Image (cartoon, helix red, strand yellow):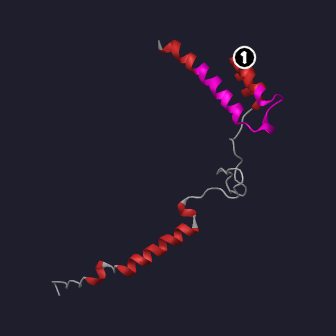
Amino acid sequence: MLLTTLPALLYIGLIVYSVFDVLQTPPDELYRLTRGQWVAVIIVVPLFGAVLWLLATGPRRGRHEHAPGHPSGTGWAAEGMSQYPVGPDDDPDFIAGLARAQRKRTLTRPDEESEKPEKEDPEN
């Protein structure tokens, strides 16, 4: 049963993926046909149309361009964003906020160790 179901699921998955990929592709990246024509080709001649679409578009890095100025060339930027997303440890505002919170904690609740009297060494 699984051996007959798996090819059918792969076939349907390829067709669905191709249709959604055509619908999400910007108009300037469409190859020779319009969006509606590509969808019609994929639906009318499913396997041939889907494979043709994948071959026509070629390998792509993703829907968004890499963030400009990012040192390693990674990090995705959405349209209109001028900066790539940064992690909290790279965000100066986040680090400054942590430092402010630490100072506030220290000022409102002194270190417990500084309040404890030092124990005298019993050997002396």
Of 60 and 94, nearer the camera is: 94
Indicate the quadrant where residue 14 lies. top right
Residue depicted at 39% across the width and 76% down the height? 105
* Residue lying at 56% horizontally and 20% vertically, measured from the top left: 9
Q: Main secondary structure of the magenta part?
A: helix
Please identify the residue farthest to the bottom as the structure is shown. Answer: 124
Question: What residue would you read off at disc 1?
Answer: 44
State the extent of the magenta-drawn residues as a range.
10-36
Q: Identify the residue at the far right of this view.
A: 32
Q: Residue 32 appears at what percent x and percent y?
A: 84, 29
How crowded is the residue under tag 1: few (<14 C-alpha within 10 Å), some, or many (20+)?
A: few
Q: From the viewer's side, name the closer residue of 37 and 117.
A: 37
- Using residue 56 as the reference point, say whether residue 110 is left or right of it: left
From this view, report whether residue 78 is shown above or below residue 46.
below
Residue 20: in magenta span:
yes
Residue 19: image location, x then y, percent: 68, 27
Task: Please give the name of the residue rendered at 59% of the width and 58% of the height, measured from the top-left corner.
Answer: 86
Q: Relative to 3, say whether 110 is above or below.
A: below
Tell me which amino acid carries mark 1: Val
